[in-house]
Amino acid sequence: MPTAELTRKSALISNFQTITGRIAIACARTGRPADADILAVTKYAADEDVITLIETGAIKIAGENKVQDARAKWTTGPLAPFRSRIKLHFIGHLQTNKAKAAVGTFDWIDGIDSLKIAVEVNRHAAALGKTMPVLIQLKLNDSATQSGVIPAKAGELLTELRGLANIVPCGYMGIAPAGANAAELKAVFAEAKKIFDRDFPAKSGGPGFKNYLSLGMSGDYELAVEAGSNLPRVGSSLFA
């Protein structure tokens, strides 16, 4: 292997080890086991970097936020040979006209924010004979452009989703307010954790599906894990 490739591989592995180490410390600070899984946000990552981390066993869960781009990369593109080695999550805002392609492309859909989109996902999953695990997106800020259900309505939406035969609600995800300080982050993460504990007291949401509270990204994943997140979404710090 050329020196440049070895150097890049070493850098990626070091990044991964740093992240997992910080997550373990964050778990230990709250007395919980190091039970958080890392969702690698691969939407902007170089294919070669993603392949390297899959081959080393670092990446087991990946996330993409554009249906067509992900479909091209993971079904016919350079990442297609590695598709079976990861669980692929859709982590963006899903439009109803993209639901069919999303159900056919992804293993999980994170970010269900209405009954309307859930019904579409359920319909297309049924047509494929597929059971689709999903996360409900909580709206943790007052941004007009941010998707999600307000926390007060989360339980109501969850009840509606549990009435659909081909999706399995497996937890909540949320995006912290942009520019929030540590105290503000802790407050919104604690609110999400309270709702998660109320609605998903078990570790499993269905056959083979782990229940997830997906909070935290590259800039705040340690605080999120301390608050109880077990599926932080990490991209820029992993592929730096």
Image (spheres, helix red, strand yellow):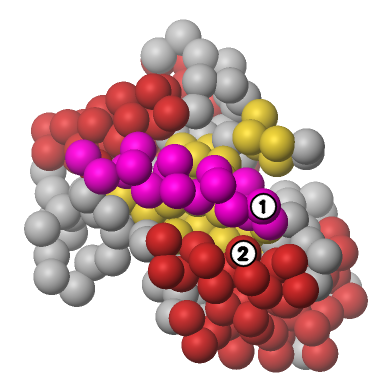
Amino acid type shown at disc 2: Asn
Q: Mark 2: few, some, or many residues within 10 Å (few <14, many ≥20)? A: many
Give the SS element for disc 1: loop
Q: Write down the region rendered in magenta.
A: 152-168
150 displayed left or right of 103: left
The residue carrying mark 2 is 122
Question: Does the magenta portion include 111?
Answer: no
Residue 33 sits above or below residue 133 on the image = above
Question: Does the magenta portion include 164?
Answer: yes
- How many angstroms separate mark 2 from mark 1 (CA)? 7 Å
Q: Relative to the observer, which residue lies in front, 41 or 75?
A: 75
Residue 125 sits above or below residue 208 on the image = below
The structure residue drawn at horizontal position 50% and vertical position 63%, both measured from the top left corner, is 118
The total of numbered circles placed on residues is 2
Q: Position of residue 158 (x, y in %)?
A: 43, 43
**Disc nearer the start of the sequence (2/1):** 2
> Considering the image in quadrants, where does the N terminus appear?
bottom right
Residue 236 sits above or below residue 97 on the image = above
The structure residue drawn at horizontal position 40% and vertical position 14%, both measured from the top left corner, is 30
Q: Mark 1: few, some, or many residues within 10 Å (few <14, many ≥20)? A: some
The residue carrying mark 1 is 165
Give the SS element for disc 2: helix
Residue 214 sits above or below residue 45 on the image = above
Which quarter of the picture shows residue 128? bottom right
The structure residue drawn at horizontal position 58% and vertical position 21%, both measured from the top left corner, is 202
Can I make out residue 103 in this image?
no
237 displayed left or right of 140: right
Amino acid type shown at disc 1: Ala
